[in-house]
Amino acid sequence: MKKNMKTLSLLAGLLFALPAQAWEVGEFRNGMPRTAVETALKTWNFDKTLTVGDDGLFVYDLPGNPAGRRFLFTFCNDKLVALEQEVDPAFRHFIVIASNYSNLYGNPLKVIPHTGVIATGEKNLLAMFWRKGSDYLGLKYVLYPASEQLSMTWQINNNCWQAPR
């Protein structure tokens, strides 16, 4: 009986010693306080920073800036729970990234195809999500009448909305 308890205690200790699954993109990681994200962003020198509702922060470079960066940070109770990074929009890039994710993480956990109509015409969305531990990695491709958008997302479950979305 004592041997079983020791073994059980050892296994429990190893479980707690394992690193928690958590995404980290650059210096941004899930659970990071909003104030820490805002402080870190000051060194990135984005052209614009916009607050999006109560839970979002959108940072981007203006069209003339060759860096062309665009990030959307989403918070739940002032903790970072999602990060979306736009990349050069091309369907070819979507295929390459989706292929890489599938090779690394298997088949997507969730696929969201959506077609709708907006003021300027038809909007088509294809989003795919993979699971890595407790994290969700996503890829979204949106085709608008006159443009397209490609973004990679990192999300975790939270109390404010159901991931992935």
Image (cartoon, rainbow, N blue to C red):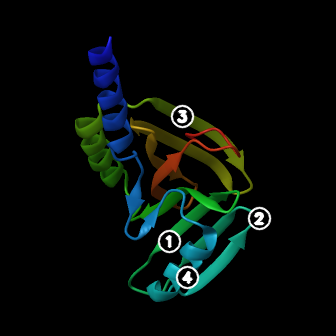
In what quadrant of the picture does the C terminus appear?
A: top right
Q: How many marks?
A: 4
Residue 15 position, x and y percent, is 35, 35
Q: Marks 4/2: CA distance? A: 19 Å
Asked if the residue at tag 2 contacts the one at tag 4, i.e. Cβ–Cβ closer than 8 Å, the answer is no
Q: Which of labels 3 and 4 is toward the front?
A: 4
Name the residue located 53 percent from the left edge and 34 percent from the top edge: 112
CA distance separating discs 3 and 4: 36 Å
**Which badge, 1 or 3, is on the more N-terminal residue?**
1
Q: Earlier in the sequence, mark 2 or mark 1?
A: 2
Question: In the image, what residue occupies the spot 38% across and 85% down?
Answer: 66
Alpha-carbon neighbours of circle 2 within 10 Å: few (<14), some, or many (≥20)?
few
- Can residue 107 be seen at all in this image of the molecule? no
Neighbor class of circle 1 (other Cα within 10 Å; few <14, some 14-19, many 20+) is some
* Location of mark 1 (residue): 70
Left or right: residue 72 compared with residue 93 = right
The kind of residue on which mark 4 rests is Thr
58 relative to 18 in the view: left or right = right
Q: Which of the two discs, 4 and 2, labels the residue nearer the N terminus?
A: 4
Where is residue 48 drawn, in percent x and y? 60, 84
The residue identified by callout 2 is 53
Q: Name the residue under label 3.
A: 113
Residue under the image location 59 percent in, 36 percent down: 114
Q: Which of marks 2 and 3 is nearer the N terminus?
A: 2
Residue 149 shows in this picture: yes
**Mark with earlier residue (4, 1):** 4
- What's under tag 2, amino acid-wise? Gly
Labelled disc at residue 39: 4
